[in-house]
Amino acid sequence: MPRTVHIPAAGGRSLHGRLFGPAEQRPGVLFVHGLHSTQAGYAERAEALAEAIGAVCLTFDLGGHGESEGSQPSLSLADHIGDVVVAYDRLVAERDVDPGRIGVAGASYGGYLAAVLTVASPNHRGIANDLTPVFAINYRRSHPGQPHRGVADVPVQRRERRGE
């Protein structure tokens, strides 16, 4: 049975989440939903993973989504990155979670935020650096004239270095 948790976020906002898992130290998995979505899309996966391998899984609504506080248009990419970091910290602080065994899953915008977390967290390093230029290019194509807020503008040459 999932437990409801409230995660303090920047600006005095509160993020609404649910923890799934057993009452002993286990691996943890953080699920990050996409833009204009909610944690509801990951509930079935989180329950299945908790049951199958005994992982403690945290789903949560980004600020301005679902039951979390904030107005989506007024929140930036940097705000959502901060939301993912505080949700990760909340999962790691859970007494049942082994902090050395944490996974992060997300799709679309949630996948990007999950990748950024791998750089922001001391336990997750390395993969997000090469994903940032792809996001920046795709964001600019789908949002012409809008600022790309919250992520450093990484030169496209990094993609060419990877042989893409």
Image (spheres, rainbow, N blue to C red):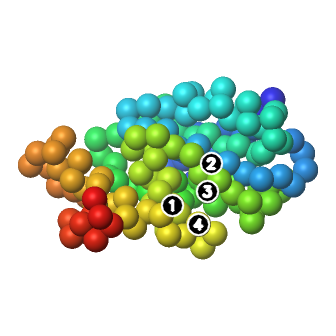
Residue positioned 55% across, 33% down in the render: 39
Q: Dot 4: within a 10 Å radius of its alpha carbon, few (fewer than 14), some, or many (20 or more) residues?
A: some
Q: Which residue is mark 3?
A: 88
- Left or right: where 112 falls relative to 142: right
Amino acid type at circle 4 is His
Amino acid type at circle 1 is Leu
Amino acid type at circle 2 is Leu
Q: Which residue is mark 4?
A: 124
Instruction: Choose mark 4 or mark 3, whichever is in front.
Output: 4
Residue positioned 80% across, 35% down in the render: 52
Secondary element at image label 1:
helix
Q: Give the alpha-carbon distance from disc 4 to disc 2, as whole Å.
A: 12 Å
Q: Are marks 2 and 1 in contact (CB under 8 Å)?
A: yes
Secondary element at image label 2:
strand
The correct choice, above or below, for 97 with respect to 155 in the image is: above
Q: Give the alpha-carbon distance from disc 4 to disc 3, as whole Å.
A: 11 Å
